[in-house]
Amino acid sequence: MTEVIRMENVTKVYRTGALEVAALRGVSFAIDEGEYVSVMGPSGSGKSTLMHILGCLDVPSGGSYWLSGEDVSSMDEIELADVRNRHIGFVFQQFNLLASLSAWRNVELPLIYAGVGHHGRRELAVEALQRVGLGDRIHHRPGELSGGQQQRVAVARALVGEPALILADEPTGALDSSSAQDVMGLLNELHASGRTLVVITHDAEVADAAERTLRIRDGLLSPLVDAV
């Protein structure tokens, strides 16, 4: 199996004047291509910090992080932005869709940053929306879609660049129970198609849908979790 993620002894310390807070205190694990992994932890556990580092939105204070074979541990902001665009598709709790743009225009945004031409962008965006069951909603704006449909647009946007990793942060947190089940079914379909998924959640039902759960508390992974 090809490793998509490898973390070795990752630490993260936040400093404010003389005050130091250790958010991560030596986290090590690996995730292979095609795995579906959830990350659970209470508020203040280090879960959000771990998500930021996984998503190349922040870098560790110590230790090493490899994403698709690239050591991203000490990259600068420009390098991290490039890695995010090439390797990671994000799905956020609040969808993060632009209200003034149609569904396909929202989905094409990562392709603009990747330098894909206009006609190619539209074709790929429409195809991604068809894959998530919204082929008949490509011209609808977010305000014309239900919460579950908006999250499907967000998933299509995450998929459109064929990233190595789909990183979902509380993907059902803003949805009613019916829409949440709909999105969870979509994540299961993505996993079945071979996608690598990491879902950050506090919801045990969402976490249980994954093949494996990493439990974090006080900046450390639970000893019950398989770590490498």
Image: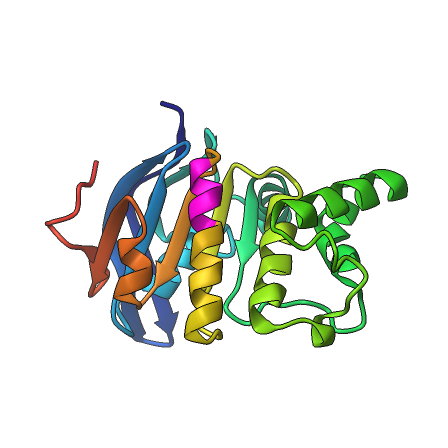
The quarter of the rendered structure image containing the N terminus is: top left
Residue 169 shows up from this direction: no
Magenta highlight on residue 123: no
The answer to whether 72 appears left or right of 106 in the picture is left
Q: Position of residue 27 (x, y in %)?
A: 25, 49
The answer to whether 159 appears left or right of 41 in the picture is right
Q: Is residue 168 above or below residue 96?
A: above
Res 63 quadrant in image: top left
Magenta highlight on residue 189: yes
The quarter of the rendered structure image containing the C terminus is: top left
Q: Position of residue 209 (x, y in %)?
A: 31, 52
Identify the coloring: rainbow
Number of marks present in the image shown? 0
Residue 226 shows up from this direction: yes
Point out the residue furthest to the top here.
Answer: 1
The stretch of residues the image draws in magenta is 187-192
- Which of the two residues, 202 or 137, is positioned nearer the viewer here? 137
Residue occupying the point 33% across, 60% down: 206
- Which of the two residues, 89 or 72, is positioned nearer the viewer here? 89
Res 96 quadrant in image: bottom right
Secondary structure predominantly adopted by residues drawn in magenta: helix
Q: Position of residue 180 (x, y in %)?
A: 44, 67
Residue occupying the point 36% across, 53% down: 61
Residue occupying the point 58% across, 72% down: 147
Res 146 quadrant in image: bottom right
Q: Position of residue 109 (x, y in %)?
A: 74, 53
